[in-house]
Image: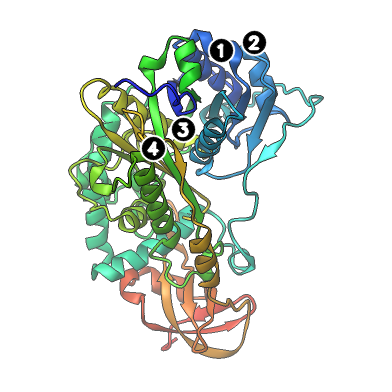
Amino acid sequence: MSPSRPDDDRLPVIVAFGQSIERDALVTPVDLMVRACDSALDEVTGLRHLVERLSVVDVMTRTGPAPATELARRLGIAPAVAEVTTIGGNSPQWLVNRASADIAGGSLSVTVIAGAEAIRSSRQRRRHGEPPPPIDADLPADPVVGDDLPGIGPAESAIGLVVPVHIYPLFESVVAARAGRTAEEHRRAIGDLLAPFTRVAAANPYAWFRQALTPEQISTPSPENRVVCEPYTKRMTAFLGSDQGAALVVCSLGAARRAGVADRAVFVWSGAGAVDVRSPTARRDPGTSPAIAAAGRALFGAAGAAGGQGTAVGIDDVDVFDLYSCFPSAVELGAEALGLRLDDPRGLTATGGLPYFGGPGNNYATHGIGAVSERLREHTGSGSALGLATGLGWFVTKHALGLYGSEPPPGGFHLGDTAADQVQIDAGAVDVAIGVTEATEASVVAVTVVRDHDGSPTGAPMIARLPDGRHVAAAADDGVTATVGGLDTPGLVGTTVVVQGEPPRYRLPDH
């Protein structure tokens, strides 16, 4: 780390990163968080009892009402604030951005951000008829921070379009159609996109699947790699069945100096966030993310201020990336919004991605940020390097981005402003029809086919545009699912269907 000015004590830095993984014993999320936090805090022992805020990312598996309070007790620390977040994979990066702004503003000195999931253990307990682990239900609930608005609207709820593995493939159909690919051609292209992710995971000791796969192994359907929802095979989707935890220690450079760990500092240069139209059906173009694009512009604009004297900082200056990767469309929309090529030689993941590293619920981005910071720490003292980490929540909905550096930003940390962009994004929402009284022709905007374990189609939800410009979320009419299941789904985008009913259902014009 190069020498810094005496007035830069308030620069926010990451000084430690810890991870945990369990493949055998039965554990709880708090067990995994304790391991990850201890691993991080053991690297910066002088900061352990100076933690002022302990933030825990929302946990999907069973915990008590106060996981942050329980975690603090087991760590033997007494932070003034112990809190949990709302649902959202954007939460870890949002927490880093918020902490960095507080540190730069002087209201915070040392914080720990932690999270974990123990889905493997939970499933094992149920499989063997074991009782769930005890919880302390008498603890007062931890305060909750973050955006708690829902991820879908009435249109999606009405047709049962509620789970990620059914909604992200809708976005994928738009991407495939725009590229002029058939479903099979696009499946192969996704294999090409994700194969490098598997190579990163294979080299990562904390990855759940440490096996490099060929594009063909990812994209070719088989009994072990069935098509889950067109065009995705199992090996293209986030793996939620892991036991993994992670923790970050974020503090001021001044606190790091006083603890004698300033040589470990990775600097937070800038942060930004934005929210796409919340209802996927109401998005004018479900194959793009205006919010990621806005957050990216704000992030690099703020980084230019951080660079000092109006220094321009852009995507070409970044050395390390970790793009949120729950499904291929998340990567594709994120890369397009940021101006990244999918085959960028710098790579798009530092961990291996959610299908291969593992998808520990809302906490994946804690691992991603930590992996980026570890890569940047390798550059300390040998030239400046920058890293970019992204997180998203719900259905490419809530976004948080962070830019990190191996050297201090001459202009200090800056938080990007997306307020004006957010007004435009919100105003761009399309009106949604919950019901369609008369049989009406509509143009297909996005479509997918849900398949069961033997490959048979069980559903074919779509988003369609009515002649008056409104969108509808529609399920296939009786007898139509099997027909749509035998068609090329990207080829259906832009074609005409007939929609009617409340909730809306559709049929093909000749049915």
Task: Give amino acid for label 3.
Answer: Thr
Query: In front of the other: label 2 or label 1?
Result: 1
Answer whether labels 1 and 4 touch (C-beta < 8 Å).
no
In whole angstroms, how far apart are the C-alphas of marks 2 and 4?
37 Å
Task: Give amino acid for label 2.
Answer: Gly
Circle nearer the N terminus (2, 4): 2
In the image, taking residue 332 as reference, residue 437 lies left or right, namely right
In whole angstroms, how far apart are the C-alphas of marks 1 and 4?
29 Å
Q: Is residue 131 visible?
A: no
Q: Quadrant of residue 158?
A: bottom right
Query: In front of the other: label 3 or label 1?
Result: 1
User: Circle 2: is it few (<14), some (14-19), or many (20+) Cα within 10 Å?
Assistant: few
Q: Which residue is mark 4?
A: 411
Q: Quadrant of residue 131?
A: top right
Residue 477 lies, with reference to residue 380, above or below; the image says: below
Identity of the residue drawn at 69% across and 38% down: 144
Q: Is residue 23 visible?
A: yes
Query: In front of the other: label 3 or label 4?
Result: 4
Question: Residue 233: where, in percent of width, then height?
Answer: 34, 51
Task: Give amino acid for label 1.
Answer: Arg
Q: What kind of element bears circle 4?
A: loop
Identity of the residue drawn at 32% across and 70% down: 490
User: Circle 1: is it few (<14), some (14-19), or many (20+) Cα within 10 Å?
Assistant: many
Q: Which residue is mark 1?
A: 48
